Amino acid sequence: MVSMSGEERGVKKKRYRSEKKKDMISGYLYVAPFFIIFGVIGLYPAAFSIYLAFQKWNGLSPMSFVGLDNFRIVLEDPLFWKSVYNTIIMGLMGTAPQIIVGIVLAFLLNLTFLRFKNFFRITIFMPYITSMVAVALIFSVLFSNHESSLANYLLGVFGFDPVNWSTSEWGTKIAISIMVFWRWVGYNTIIYLAGIQSISNDLYEAATIDGANKFQQLLFITMPLLKPFIILTVFFSTVGALQLFSEPTIFLGAGAFTRDEALTVVMYLYRDAFKLQSFGTASATAIILLVIILFFATINTLITSGTGRKKKGVR
Amino acid sequence: MVKNKSKTKWLGLGLASMLVFSLGACSGDDEASGGSDGEVTLDFWAFGATNYEELAKEYEKEHPNVTIKVRSAETAEHHDALFTALSAGSGAPDIAALEVDQLDRFKEAQGRFENLYDLGAKEVQDQYLDWKWEAGANQEGDFLIGLPTDIGPKALYYRTDLFEEAGLPTEPDKVEALIDSPEAFKEAGMKVKEETGKPFVDSIEMAYRAYLDASEKTYLNPDGELLLGKEGNDVKKAYDYAVELNKAGIVGKLEMWSPEWANAVNKGEFAAELGAGWLKGWMEGNAPDAVGKWRVATLPTEFAANWGGSYISIPSETEHPQEAYDFVEWLVSPDNQLKSFESKGLFPSATSVYDMEEFKTNEDKFFGGQVTSTVFAEAAQDIDGAVFKGVKYFPVHQEVLNALHNVQEGGDPEKEWKAAIKRAEDLIDR
């Protein structure tokens, strides 16, 4: 497989080179498992999906090339735009508050006079490591359509009418957003907390000597130095929000792919592939989603790094 | 040369590990089926609650050279796994059960299945109900994808306590005589509503399915074209009837299989269910408080229909089509269908079973000692012809149901109907 003729020229040289090569080969072998697995279950399906986007295929019959037809079908489908709208709305309601609440929680958790710190940290992080299926099932009980469900009961206490949490336009979105918020806020808080703790105490001491109060310290020391962490979480949250799938699917149960109130883009894609046996349009949707994610991730990252720069200018 | 050897060893190791990885990732376990002296191993994928494992053991005793491995899964999971295996071109079993609602999806790829007519199915054709057999063949009628197993003839399940309270008869033959038309069905419903205050039918889907299940032409034609909203099918009639019943206030909001629905069956929160034969088995196991409260009567002929049932097919990947076929033919024979009926309530599609003594005298404690099997047998024979469903039957069905649910929440029936057609059109040409 490999030509060995060059190896037979000089013993000294050969020994040195082959040792080096041996190291090289063993190095490649160490990293090979990742690349092989990634290639088989990551890269290949992704590439195949791009290929599929230009084919009409129901999974069993032979494929036929249809050009850009799949993209046309998806882009002309009002249900697709409804799913984009749903995804963005739920993304805004579910993830945007996380950023703000996450910073506040992280700041509170870092206060020197706070007791039982570890208890609070674990409590806030717990939802993130809880099984998502369990979370969605519990939430579907809390937010059931029934008048006596906990959510409707609480609304009743404050004098509001009960809401159809799994069939109404805003009820579903609010319930799912609350679930997403509850589940992910701890994750962001921990990242911010790590960020806050990496800020040197000297800066705060110097600021205190200069006469800055706590709020000014938060605004002019913590926030700017936390910027890389904020960019990171905004980026992850944007990508995560646009890929929302499991939470609404399990929350809605049997109605998940049949009603449009909380149908997200990934659910729309899944419905195409596995409910309608149309792998071509599903793949086309995946590519459109990729473009949407790139667009929003870029915009959000630009905005967050931009606000930081402004602050720098003010300072 | 020593060095060269060690190098080739390294390379060999690398390549071997790559192969192991890629093989492990790509292929399922290839079982060596078939041995030297006529030993045959057949993989059989079934779904739901069946007695096929016991029957397979019996068959193995009679045919010592045959081993049958039965693997049973949940319905959706079973069909998805089979679909994936067929799509990938490897990993499909020798024998696979197919649910009637999933049938058209697999019929589209008939090239991946054995034509059972080539294996001798013609000889047993006259044992089975015509409409059931026809639905297992392709449109031209020259390719048979599966042999018939059970069916789901629909009948009227009704609560005797609520019927009595409403002043309606409670004996099955008197109920049949009273509710002999769609109009009479509605009138009985309004009486129940007036006297007891409870809904007659559990959900709008059931009211809709009354006519829908009985029509031979529904949403799609064999060319995959949408018939919804066009002339020549009964969907609109079914839709209008459901709207009419809803307007009369006799339709509940209890979705089948939901916990609320299960509770209502148990406690008698609605009076009538247009259920298939298999619902009986569920009720017996899940409605302990309703023992003796429910009875079964035949539906008006307009509503005579089938709901559910299965076929057994042989994917072409098998190396032993004839051996597989022989087992399947034996498995769905009238005698074995009777056994499946007695142990798991799978309602037979072989007509000779209906005349067997054990079948006719099968009293149901749950139904107050009524012999329900003859009611369903009668319903099965009332059905006219095979219903064509098509690959996208369910997505379209779902859109119409959404429209009906919106009507129940106060939507305008005509507007919702038009919106449903629009949504169905959007999903059909992809």
Image (spheres, coloured by chain):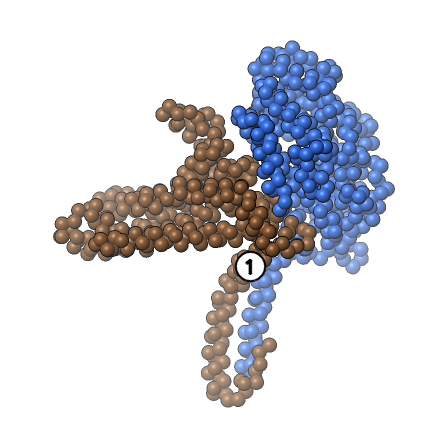
Say above or below: B102 vs A156.
Answer: below
**Is A92 left, or right, of B218 in this rendering?**
left
At horizontal 59% and vertical 34% (from top left) the residue drawn is B420
Residue neighbourhood size for the residue with mark 1, other residues' Cα within 10 Å, grouped as few (<14), some (14–19), many (≥20): few
Could you say which is closer to the camera, residue B397 or residue B374? B397
Q: Can residue B279 be seen in this view?
A: no
Q: Residue at 32% x, 54% y: name it.
A: A305
Residue where numbered disc 1 is placed: A47
Which of A167/A145 is in front? A167
Q: Quadrant of the N terminus of chain B?
A: bottom right
In the displayed structure image, the side of residue A103 where residue A242 appears, left or right: right
Give the residue displayed 52% in from the left and 53% down from the top.
A287
B134 over B406 or under it: above or below? below
Q: Which amino acid does label 1 sit on?
A: Ala
The answer, for residue A47, to whether it is visible in the render is yes
Residue B231 image offset from top left, x and y in percent:
70, 32
Where, by quadrant of the figure, is residue B246 drawn?
A: top right
Judge by depth and name the residue closer to the eye, B425 or A210.
Answer: B425
